[in-house]
């Protein structure tokens, strides 16, 4: 049984007196422990789909199943890491990582042990007493990842988590995320606009078509050994294939924006 099964006939929003159809006929499955990247033009509904998988948006036609059960709300087994991260500036690195555990009333000793484990996993033990404004953007991403992992979810949903980082920080985090994924074996669904990033990180890449009504256009398997870098020849070859599918959709998006 796949850990996630998606069969969405349509997703729409009310817009004034009309209904705005975002996407339709989105069908795919994700296996346990799989790393799947979603790519597509701006506005095709990737973040909306992630919100549906998280249980944050139940207003759609169709069905999403998590381990065979319909998703009808949020669940600690499916955690979202947003672009904005949502870290608390008045808490230290350790306190941010422990926040969810504290809300769940995990005993202090167990909470300390879990925090220590993930602080070491993301290589932030030296900065555990630092506040968020005292660490780099790349470190903040690792804090957000450690906070999510500390809750031990089965699925991590990541919405363009590296988009605000410089190229050097991104390259380092590609290595780190692959290493951590290899240790934890979590199922990851990762939204990105960066095709190289998707091929570097993903086992599989789902390509979405252009708005105004997007569909699932193509699926690519990435059978390359890990760890991967964005400069590797195999990565570049698959990037060309994926971008070949995506290029026409990006052009459609620009045509729709400038010639509606």
Image (cartoon, rainbow, N blue to C red):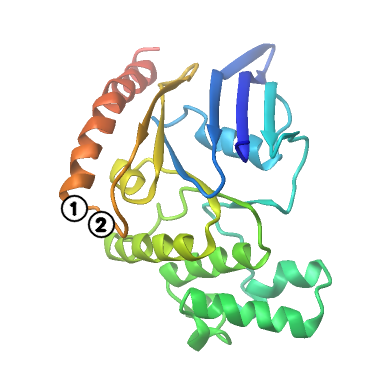
Side of 233 relative to 207 (left or right) = left
Q: Quadrant of the C terminus?
A: top left
x and y percentages locating residue 191 in the rendered image: 47, 42
Task: Label 1, secondary structure: give it.
Answer: loop
Q: Percent from the top left, x then y, of residue 214?
A: 48, 20
Please tell me how crowded label 1 is: few (under 14), some (14-19), or many (20+) other residues with Cα within 10 Å. Answer: few
Residue 237: quarter of image = top left
Q: Position of residue 91 (x, y in %)?
A: 66, 77
Q: Residue at x 64, y 73 (%)?
A: 96
Secondary element under disc 2, as helix, strand or loop, is loop
Residue 92 visible in the displayed image: no
Quadrant in which residue 57 is drawn: top right
Q: Is residue 212 visible?
A: yes
Q: Number of numbered discs present?
A: 2
Separation of marks 2 and 1 at Cα, in angstroms = 6 Å
Q: What's the mark number on residue 149? A: none
Q: Residue at x 73, y 54 (%)?
A: 76
Give the image quarter of residue 219.
top left
208 relative to 168 in the view: left or right: right
Q: Which residue is at the far front?
A: 1
Answer whether labels 2 and 1 touch (C-beta < 8 Å).
Answer: yes
Numbered label attached to residue 232: 1
- Which of these two is toward me, 12 or 69? 69
Q: Which residue is mark 2?
A: 229
Residue at 41% over, 65% down? 179
Residue shown at the point (56%, 52%) measured from the top left:
82
Tell me the crowding category of disc 2: few under 14, some 14 to 19, or many 20 or more residues within 10 angstroms, Cα based: some
Residue 16 position within the rendered picture, expressed as x and y whole percent measured from the top left:
67, 17
> Is residue 172 shown above or below 26?
below
Which of these two is toward me, 110 or 131?
Answer: 110
Which corner quadrant holds the N terminus? top right
């Amino acid at each position: 049984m796949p850990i996630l099964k998606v069969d969405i006939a349509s997703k729409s929003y009310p817009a004034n007196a009309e209904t705005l159809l975002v996407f339709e006929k989105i069908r795919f499955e994700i296996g346990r422990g799989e790393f799947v990247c979603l790519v597509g033009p701006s506005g095709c509904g990737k973040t909306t789909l992630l919100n549906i998988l998280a249980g944050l948006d139940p207003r759609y036609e169709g069905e999403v199943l998590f381990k065979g059960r319909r998703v009808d709300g949020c669940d600690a087994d499916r955690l979202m890491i947003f672009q904005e991260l949502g870290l608390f500036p008045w808490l230290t690195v350790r306190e941010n990582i422990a926040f969810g555990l504290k809300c769940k009333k995990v005993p202090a000793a167990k909470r300390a042990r879990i925090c220590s484990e993930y602080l070491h996993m993301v290589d932030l033990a030296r900065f555990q007493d630092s506040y968020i404004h005292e660490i780099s953007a790349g470190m903040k991403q690792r804090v957000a990842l450690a906070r999510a992992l500390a809750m031990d979810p089965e699925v991590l949903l990541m919405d363009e988590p590296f988009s605000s980082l410089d190229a050097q920080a991104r390259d380092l985090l590609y290595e780190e995320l692959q290493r951590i994924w290899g240790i934890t074996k979590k199922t990851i669904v990762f939204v990105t606009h960066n095709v190289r990033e998707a091929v570097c990180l993903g086992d599989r890449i789902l390509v979405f078509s252009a708005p105004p009504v997007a569909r699932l256009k193509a699926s690519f398997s990435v059978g390359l050994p890990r760890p991967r870098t964005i400069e590797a020849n195999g990565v570049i070859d698959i990037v060309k294939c994926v971008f070949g599918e995506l290029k026409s959709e990006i052009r459609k998006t620009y045509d729709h924006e400038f010639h509606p």
